[in-house]
Image (spheres, grey):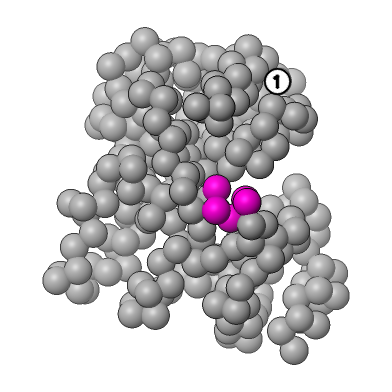
Amino acid sequence: MFEKRKLKNALAYYVHHQEVLRKIFYALDKSDIDWAIVGGFVRYILENGNKSLDNGPRDFDIVIDCSLEYFVNLIDSLGVSYTQNDFGGIKIKGVPGDTFAGKEIDIWTLENHKPFKIFESEYAPFPSYDFRTPFMSFKNIPDSAWISIDGATWVVNKNKLYAKNAKKSIKSNSIFITNYDLLKKYKDKNSFMLAAKLIKYYYLGYTLDKDCWDIIKTEMTKNPDKVEDFLNSHYKYYMSWRSFIDEKIIRKIS
């Protein structure tokens, strides 16, 4: 209950200070749509509570349980600009000069939420392994994330929190692979992205287990440029990653 109160307080703070968020969240709140905030925002509040909210999450990932067409019509009625993001969702960016500048909102439908679409595209050649029906629910989003600390899900309109794996990682200050059995069974074409995310968490002070380091070592051997490019394109607000890779990662895996 205390965790959900912290999430509510943090959301109220951002909604109060940022007009774009206020428009989106008020519209969702007035609708009959079930919707959830997933990932970084939830993780940040579970880690830090309501401290340093001004330095809080830079983006918000939202999953909605309705058709994208329905939601786009809702967004259009608000006069908010958006573009298409990965896997058919929409992206809303803050514009220079407003309080949301430098931040982003990514919105997917439950059916098109990124992990589900990755499952569908990666494992489509294996028809006997059907993810779609059992996984398409808010409570299963955490288990659809590769990394334990990712995928924490707060269903806002119902005030339900699904974050067992993330809370375990935060409590132990360690990262583990949630779906490592799947990684072993089916080759993931985008493992360099997974390696980059693991490197980011290592930089943030988390301990990585042997499985995590094995993934990093493999990808830094096979796809070092892709790993570094992903870090610099997606996490450039932390630093330029070249020196950290040379001084910390290469030394660790050598």
Q: Does 168 lie within the magenta span?
A: yes
Residue 226 shows in this picture: no
Mark 1 residue type: Thr
Q: Residue at x 61, y 73 (%)?
A: 209
Residue 3 seen from this side? yes
In this rendering, position of residue 3 left or right of residue 237: left
Question: Magenta region's main secondary structure?
Answer: helix
Q: Nearer the viewer, residue 9 or 119?
A: 9
Seen in the picture, residue 57 relative to 97 is either above or below; the reply is: below
Percent x, y of residue 233: 66, 56
Q: Quadrant of residue 139?
A: top left
- Where are the magenta residues, as a range? 167-171
- In this picture, residue 202 sits left or right of residue 69: right
- Where, by quadrant of the figure, is residue 213 drawn? bottom right
Tell me, yes or no, whether the highlighted magenta stretch contains residue 85: no
Q: Nearer the viewer, residue 171 or 134?
A: 171
Question: Residue at the bottom extreme?
Answer: 254
Residue at point 39% right, 36% down? 63
Report the label total. 1
Drawn side of residue 131 relative to residue 231, left or right: left
Q: Can you give x and y, in whole percent of width and height, for residue 216 in the image? A: 62, 76
Q: Residue at x 31, y 26 (%)?
A: 34
Secondary structure beneath dot 1 equals loop
Residue 196 spot, x, y in % from top left? 62, 66
In the image, residue 254 above or below residue 26: below
Residue 54 location in percent, x, y?
Answer: 75, 27
Residue neighbourhood size for the residue with mark 1, other residues' Cα within 10 Å, grouped as few (<14), some (14–19), many (≥20):
some
Q: Is residue 18 left or right of residue 155?
A: right
- Which residue bears the numbered disc 1? 99
Quadrant location of the C terminus in the rendered image:
bottom right
